[in-house]
Amino acid sequence: MAWQSLPVPRLEGVSQEQFMQHLYPQRKPLVLEGIDLGACTSKWTVDYLSQVGGRKEVKIHVAAVAQMDFISKNFVYRTLPFDKLVQRAAEEKHEEFFISEDVADIRKQFPLLEGDIKFPKFFKEEQFFSSVFRISSPGLQLWTHYDVMDNFLIQVTGKKRVVLFSPRDAQYLYLSGTKSEVLDIDNPDLAKYPLFSKARRYECSLKAGDVLFIPALWFHNVISEEFGVGVNIFWKHLPSECYDKTDTYGNKDPTAASRAAQILDRALKTLAELPEEYRDFYARRMVLHIQDKAYSKNFE
């Protein structure tokens, strides 16, 4: 089955004012071209990164297959010296697939590389949460997931294909936490996941120098079409007090959402005390009540 995808819009030479006033409020993915990223797009070769990044230990995911699955955990966590990660991920023939996952600020983690890259100044510095190296083997596919913060995916070198789904289509993605159970998004098992075909796909290809804006809550699946180096920049879209202060990785739901989920779990346990016929009836009433009180009319 050939899947029809809507193209993610591409705009060149977008200014900070244009982005913040006109594009950012739309809360939709966007590929920005022609952003001044510094010398990194030409300097960050395998040899240069290996030499300048040095032997600093970094955390990585390692898998024997290209499709990484966070739900079944078909990968292992390891630490490698940064230069070894770059060299092994760049191998054309490999028995293992690598992706870096250290959450930090690469400007502090690798100060000798800081001067090579310019972060887009499209958010306030106090909103900044983290910057993360995305160094991945060719062919690697990262599971479909959402993040609770806005982010820029800067494609420094190499090429990626990114498929995105709107938060409005969460009901079709067979979620387990923040991740989708549907691994093969191009050839899904529709007998197992029949509703997946209703999810509207958005797609883009990223080349060196492209910057993809991924709004918080948008699901995304990333395929590395060749060895490449990327940088994710995450920043807080909501006021700081909305986020879990113990959230080191930036992947916990906002505190109000977590509390609401806990209350819902307690409500469901209470409903379980009823006979099936009554439980079904009052569960449907609860769903209708949630739709009436919590669904936004702005996204109809």
Image (cartoon, rainbow, N blue to C red):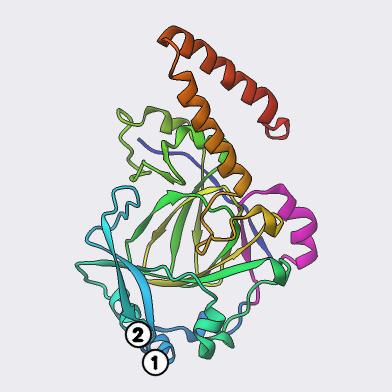
Locate residue 174 relative to residue 19 in the image: left or right: left
136 or 204, nearer to the observer: 136
User: In the rendered structure, which segment of residues is drawn in magenta?
Assistant: 14-36
- List the residue tagged with mark 2: 83
Residue 96 in view of the camera: yes
Give x and y (percent) for residue 151: 59, 61
Q: Residue at x 42, y 89 (%)?
A: 48
User: Is 72 within the magenta?
Assistant: no
Spot occupied by residue 7 in the image (x, y as percentages of width and height) = 55, 48
10, 200: nearer the viewer: 200
What is the distance, in whole Å, between disc 2 and disc 1 at their CAs? 7 Å
Q: Which residue is mark 1?
A: 51
* Snapshot quadrant of residue 128: bottom right
Q: Classify 10 Å Cα crowding around label 2: few (below 14), some (14-19), many (20 and above).
A: many
Q: Which quadrant holds the C terminus? A: top right
Q: Are marks 2 and 1 in contact (CB under 8 Å)?
A: yes
Please name the residue shown 56% across and 34% down the image: 263
The residue under label 2 is which amino acid type?
Answer: Asp
